[in-house]
Image: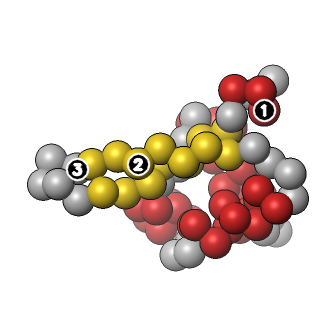
Amino acid sequence: MKTQNEIILDHIKKYGSITPRDAFERYDIMRLASRVSELRKSGVDIYTDIKTTKKGKRYASYRLAKEAKQ
């Protein structure tokens, strides 16, 4: 069975990015920011893009740095 970090990294590689909503709805992962922090500490270069909904709510979208995409 894959760890949450592996699931998140696989998702980013396949789809280009992941949001907290993606993580929760697809994988029941509730603490995406914590998992991203762990991935960063393990050496994965992840960027955070702050996005805004039509109603003005802000949320994070995580993607690999260009150098990390191979």
For the residue labelled by badge 2, is the local secondary structure a helix, a strand or a loop? strand
Which residue corresponds to the image point at 68% horizontal and 46% vertical from the top-left? 46
User: On residue 68, which mark appears?
Assistant: 1
Residue 57 percent coordinates (x, y): 23, 59
**Does residue 24 appear left or right of residue 36 in this picture?**
left
Residue 12 percent coordinates (x, y): 63, 43
- Discs 1, 3 touching: Cβ within 8 Å: no
For the residue labelled by badge 3, is the local secondary structure a helix, a strand or a loop? loop
User: On residue 53, which mark appears?
Assistant: 3
Q: Identify which residue, 30 or 65, lies in the foreground.
A: 65
Mark 2 is surrounded, within 10 Å at the Cα level, by few (under 14), some (14 to 19) or many (20 or more) other residues, namely few
Q: Mark 1 or mark 2: which is in front?
A: 2
What amino acid type is highlighted by mark number 2? Ile
For the residue labelled by badge 1, is the local secondary structure a helix, a strand or a loop? helix
Mark 1 is surrounded, within 10 Å at the Cα level, by few (under 14), some (14 to 19) or many (20 or more) other residues, namely few
What amino acid type is highlighted by mark number 1? Ala
Q: Residue lying farthest left?
A: 55
**Does residue 33 appear left or right of residue 10 in this picture?**
left
Which residue corresponds to the image point at 77% horizontal and 27% vertical from the top-left? 67
- Discs 2, 3 touching: Cβ within 8 Å: no
Mark 3 is surrounded, within 10 Å at the Cα level, by few (under 14), some (14 to 19) or many (20 or more) other residues, namely few
User: On residue 51, which mark appears?
Assistant: none
Residue 10 visible, this angle: no
User: On residue 50, which mark appears?
Assistant: 2
Residue 2 visible, this angle: yes
Q: Identify which residue, 22 or 26, lies in the foreground.
A: 22
Which residue corresponds to the image point at 81% horizontal and 24% vertical from the top-left? 70
Cα–Cα gap, marks 1 and 2 = 20 Å
Q: Earlier in the sequence, mark 1 or mark 3?
A: 3
Cα–Cα gap, marks 1 and 3 = 28 Å
Which residue corresponds to the image point at 87% horizontal and 59% vertical from the top-left? 42
Residue 50 percent coordinates (x, y): 41, 48
